[in-house]
Image (spheres, rainbow, N blue to C red):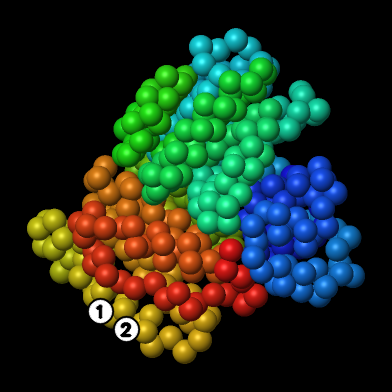
């Protein structure tokens, strides 16, 4: 949790992400650096935007901490609020053992499962529990998306070693979504170093989460593959039909849903708990605010929307032949030439950022539609590039895009450009 007021302002302004903020705050606390000297020592070549942000908010530096992002820990994500099912018992038991320092086969632990099965919730719950049991310990939770971008920038600034030392100093280090390390071989090298160093110290633990079994990751570093193969790994399984029915009942709370409606949701919403919750919530809201009778017609309409993932489109008569032929209709409608022209014709930095975000989001969507394991690394690189663009760091984004290579051509046009001039307001090259 970032407590230093200057760093909280920088995070609020988007000048650093959460893990970089924790690193800078630790440096200033440990060495009594001023903001300017801490930035210089950490390799930030241009401190002006950071100091300007402090100056413009000098009177608000001690404002309510609720006004500032304080890292990825979510207050409501605890073990008490996690909806357990029989398929989750082994995962929760393993994380409880981590929290209580129980003996494990390996000091490194990994949980995996598809999108929406609760991995992020469980890592947050683990941090909450460790802080409750061992408040004297330093526990750090970071998403691999932020960590990978921060590592790339630390390498460019020349303070990679010190940044990794900071991370490995945590008593418990939790890293969410490690599949994004597929993006960059040097990020994989850093992850390997953390896996080797951090748990090797007495009483320290490393907990990872991944969308797939970590052994299936497309990794260029053979040593990292071997290290991952030796950690304790458990998987989250999708809910079965009976468990989905029980989940619908719990999510409905005291609201009386007809049995046939609950049965329809459990039978047809098969993705994850998030989709179940969305369907139940929308159904109750439609009933309360629209005063509509809850019946099969209403629930069928809501389920058809709730079960449609972002970026996924409902099939139409004209789209079906294209999909049957193995073509993604979205790719046909979004001509790469249009995306290129949109970027080139942007009038200012804000328009360029927006155009680049749309182009990268489209490329990620097309590659994700293919559902090929070989697309893991390019998807990961595109997500890192998109995150860097959103933070105004076009240098990192451009570097990631230039490393895409021929693997990107499987799903879309690899030559969609990323403008290097589209930095956000006040965002420095880092």
User: Would you say 153 lies left or right of 370 here?
Assistant: right
Residue 277 vertical placement versus 89 (above, below) = below
Task: Name which residue lies at 26% across and 65% down.
Answer: 414
Tell me if mark 2 has few (under 14), some (14-19) or many (20+) residues whose alpha carbon lies within 10 angstroms of its own: few
Residue 376 got which mark?
Answer: none
Foreground of the two, 269 or 107: 107
Asked if the residue under mark 2 is in contact with the one under mark 1, i.e. CB atoms within 8 Å, the reply is yes
The answer to whether 172 is drawn above or below residue 413 in the figure is above
Q: Position of residue 224 (x, y in %)?
A: 40, 31
Residue 154 locus on image (x, y percent): 57, 52
The quarter of the rendered structure image containing the N terminus is top right
* Residue 68 seen from this side: no
Q: Secondary structure at mark 1?
A: helix
Q: Nearer the viewer, residue 68 or 295?
A: 68
Quadrant of residue 259 in the image?
top left
Name the residue carrying label 2: 341
The residue carrying pointer 1 sits among few (fewer than 14), some (14 to 19) or many (20 or more) residues within 10 Å by Cα, namely few
Left or right: residue 340 versus residue 120 is: left
Quickly name the residue at label 1: 337
Alpha carbon of mark 1 to alpha carbon of mark 2: how far?
6 Å
In x, y percent, where is residue 240? Answer: 38, 29
Task: For residue 112, say whether it is visible.
Answer: yes
Q: Quadrant of the C terminus?
A: bottom right
Q: Position of residue 115 (x, y in %)?
A: 43, 43
Depth check, front residue: 311 or 123: 123
420 relative position to 327: left or right = right
Q: Residue at x 49, y 37 (%)?
A: 191
For residue 367, what is the image quadrant?
bottom left
333, above or below 430, in the image: below
Q: Residue at x 33, y 31 (%)?
A: 222
Question: Which residue shows up at 65% across the image and 52% down it?
Answer: 20
Query: Which sits in the foreground, 395 or 303?
Result: 395
């Amino acid at each position: 949790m970032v407590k230093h007021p200057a760093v909280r302002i920088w995070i609020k302004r988007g000048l650093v992400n959460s893990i970089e903020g924790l690193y800078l705050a630790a440096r200033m606390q440990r060495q009594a650096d001023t903001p300017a000297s801490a930035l210089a020592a950490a390799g930030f070549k241009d401190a002006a935007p950071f100091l300007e942000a402090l100056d413009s908010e000098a009177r608000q530096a001690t404002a309510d901490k609720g006004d500032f992002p304080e890292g990825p820990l979510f207050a409501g994500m605890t073990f008490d609020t996690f909806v357990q099912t029989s398929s989750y018992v082994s995962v929760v038991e393993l994380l409880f053992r981590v929290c209580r320092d129980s003996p494990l086969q390996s000091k490194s632990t990994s949980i995996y499962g598809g999108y929406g099965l609760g991995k992020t919730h469980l890592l947050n719950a683990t941090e909450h529990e460790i802080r409750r049991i061992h408040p004297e310990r330093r526990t750090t939770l970071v998403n691999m998306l932020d960590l990978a971008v921060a590592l790339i920038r630390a390498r460019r600034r020349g303070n990679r070693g010190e940044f990794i030392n900071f991370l490995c100093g945590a008593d418990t280090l939790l890293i969410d979504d490690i599949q994004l390390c597929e993006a960059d071989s040097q990020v994989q090298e850093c992850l390997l170093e953390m896996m080797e160093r951090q748990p090797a110290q007495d009483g320290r633990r490393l907990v990872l989460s991944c969308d797939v079994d970590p052994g299936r990751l497309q990794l260029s570093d053979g040593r990292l593959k071997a290290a991952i193969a030796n950690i304790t790994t458990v998987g989250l399984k999708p809910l079965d039909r009976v468990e989905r029915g029980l989940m619908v009942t719990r999510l409905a709370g005291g609201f009386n849903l007809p049995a046939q409606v609950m049965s329809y949701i459990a039978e047809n919403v098969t993705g994850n708990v998030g989709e179940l919750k969305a369907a139940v919530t929308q159904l109750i809201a439609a009933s309360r605010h629209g005063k509509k009778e809850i019946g099969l017609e209403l629930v069928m309409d809501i389920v058809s929307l709730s079960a449609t993932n972002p970026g996924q489109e409902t099939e139409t008569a004209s789209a079906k032949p294209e999909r049957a032929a193995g073509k993604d209709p979205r790719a046909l409608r979004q001509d790469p030439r249009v995306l290129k022209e949109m970027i080139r014709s942007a009038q200012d930095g804000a328009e360029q950022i927006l155009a680049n975000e749309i182009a990268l989001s489209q490329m990620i969507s097309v590659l994700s539609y293919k559902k090929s394991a070989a697309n893991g690394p390019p998807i990961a690189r595109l997500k890192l590039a998109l995150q860097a663009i959103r933070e105004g760091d076009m240098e990192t984004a451009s570097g990631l895009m230039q490393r895409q290579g021929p693997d990107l051509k499987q799903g879309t046009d690899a030559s969609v450009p990323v403008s290097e001039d589209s930095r956000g307001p006040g965002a420095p090259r880092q």
